[in-house]
Image (tube, grey):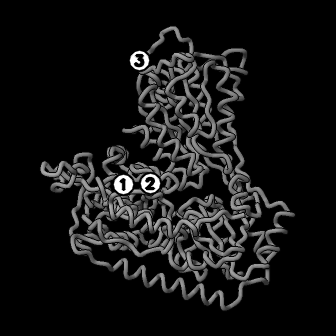
Amino acid sequence: MSDGASTVRLTVGQALVRFLAAQWSERDGVEQRFFAGCFGIFGHGNVAGVGQALAQAAHADPEELPYYQSRNEQAMVHAAVGFARLRDRLQTFACTTSIGPGATNLVTGAALATINRIPVLLLPGDIFATRVANPVLQELEDPRSYDVSVNDTLRPVSRYWDRINRPEQLIPAALAAMRVLTDPAETGAVTLALPQDVQAESHDWPVEFFARRVWHVARPVPEPAALDRAVELIRSARRPLLVAGGGVIYSGATQALADFAAATGVPVAETQAGKGSLTWDHPAAVGAIGATGTTAANELAAQADVVIGVGTRYSDFTTASRSVFANPDVRFVNVNVASFDAAKHAGLAVVADAKATLTALGERLAGWQVDQDYRTRTTELAGNWQRIVDDAYAATAPTNLAQTAVLGAVNEAAGERGVVINAAGSMPGELHKLFRARDPKQYHVEYGYSCMGYEIAAGLGVRLAAPDREVIVLVGDGSYLMLAQEIVTAVQENVKLTIVLVQNHGYASIGSLSESVGSERFATSYRYRNPKTGALDGDVLPVDLAANAASLGADVIRAGSLDELRSALAKAREATRTTLVHVETDPLTGAPDSQAWWDVPVAEVSTLEATQRARAEYDKNKPSQRQYL
């Protein structure tokens, strides 16, 4: 201590750790620590700074900012995102790395967090601020400026980025970081680059910097005039459709949505992030919308005269590349905390919280509802789709299992509250169409970035966030090969996961897309190179990913039939250790068609007949795409 009791002498690393441990979030009167812990991998760039500070803090109070050992820097960000998403962005993790490759490994995870608007704090080590030892190990020497390091690659994928070149710079930077992390409209990855010499430098810090600080997560209420305009437009609608995005779930607005839909009869379609906003059997639920949507939602979207978007950013999959809302007179009412999204499609913008706005709309629209014929049509379309889902879940395949049947078994095994996690390949599209969500947090598909390798790491974060829930990680062989290392962390921390590894010996999703654009599934299977053709079309590779999982510490069950899969899932549920269920599927057995389009350009000229046919189909669909003005 120095200067009486007004300051305390600590290193920058020690001050940062103490500051993070004192940050809390609050919404609706509920307070919680904002940082549940810190994931990290140590190297020369952070071991003596943030690493030493975490070790010292663990001696004083191991519960204030617990440390978790990770195996891959990208994976630690995915784990933090999985945790924060389940906690409605009111809590997250910090992630610390060394300089060089450790720092650049964060880039993919940071992009995922920012695209999905999920808070995560990144603390990469950096080169010496004093520059006396330049070039240090792993330093990128840029001849244009000594002020550039590899951490600058994190600038475009961070919502806030700063480099702490002097101890006193930490205070404003840390406060700015917290402002962004706790702002629902601004949140995403936040990066504080920490030069390794500065991390270990001491400074006299004002004790107020370490006081318990509560960040209020606001619920912006709708502007009265904007609400008036929205009510007027909705009342004029004959065929309205509500599109529920992730903002509905993050806002805790699912009950408000259910009440609104029940009172008005407005059918509700869901984006990937918004799936689970309504229970699948709610009378107004018509399921997924867009390129991976249901025929029910997409037929209603094609005729809708008013689309009420709540908490959605209208990605190209949601809008089927701006073709699904086909009514030439369609108008949009967009409810979003981010003005950037509220203004999309020339919509009537209501920049406000989803829960607050749905509640206000329900009050202002009291007594108004859609015609009974429209309710009846909604029920008929939804019922027709559910019969299609039944058939898909019971589907068989010529070889191995149909993937849709595997998803049906997982849907059943999830029960009322189990969380199913997926991110990449063919499964996100099939899950979006088919999965029957019973709980707002049950469906956890990362599709903003659709990042291969997300699943297992996110499963770790989800289970840390909800230790009372069964967590089922659905991962294809391609995604498993990208990033499976956090099985080791789950085993180390005794965090039990059920991992369903779907093995189809290649990239089923891209194989199907390749075929649809006339590229003949080129290089989408895991095959030996054929000495006769020179192509990768030889025998199937002898890869045993179940054995790999066992080598990482997981228990393994192999399932060869649907009955064996159901039995394996039941055994995994009762297990106390991370258990991987290995099942092989037929990559050529597809899911029901959404009857919607996705704009993936096809070569204009080609000598391949398959490409020529695909281009003709593309040219037929392209005119359906439009600007919403």
Image quadrant containing the C terminus: bottom right
The answer to whether residue 426 is seen in the rendering is no
The answer to whether residue 236 is seen in the rendering is yes
Q: Amino acid at mark 1?
A: Lys
Coordinates of residue 380 in the picture (x, y in percent): 55, 88
Coordinates of residue 307 in the picture (x, y in percent): 68, 71
Q: Residue beneath label 3, please?
A: 137
Coordinates of residue 397 in the picture (x, y in percent): 26, 75
Residue at horizontal 43%, vertical 59%? Answer: 421
For label 3, count other residues whose C-alpha is less than 10 Å away and answer few (under 14), some (14-19) or many (20+): few
Q: Secondary structure at mark 2?
A: helix
Q: Quadrant of residue 574?
A: bottom left
Q: Residue beneath label 1, please?
A: 496
Query: What is the distance, in whole Å, between disc 2 and disc 3 at their CAs?
Result: 37 Å
Residue at horizontal 61%, vertical 61%? Answer: 314
Q: In the rendered structure, find residue 290 and report the number of the disc placed on it.
A: none
563 sits left or right of 140 in the view: left
Residue at horizontal 47%, vertical 25%? Answer: 46
70 sits left or right of 293 in the view: left
Give the camera-side residue of 446 and 472. Answer: 446
N-terminal label among 1 and 3: 3
N-terminal label among 2 and 3: 3
Give the camera-side residue of 235 and 583. Answer: 235
Coordinates of residue 28 in the picture (x, y in percent): 71, 57
Marks 2 and 1 in Cβ contact (< 8 Å) = yes
For label 1, count other residues whose C-alpha is less than 10 Å away and answer few (under 14), some (14-19) or many (20+): many
Query: What is the distance, in whole Å, between disc 1 and disc 3 at their CAs?
Result: 38 Å
Q: In the rendered structure, find residue 463 and report the number of the disc placed on it.
A: 2
Q: Secondary structure at mark 3?
A: loop
Query: What is the distance, in whole Å, between disc 2 and disc 1 at their CAs?
Result: 8 Å
Q: Amino acid at mark 3?
A: Leu
Q: Amino acid at mark 2?
A: Arg
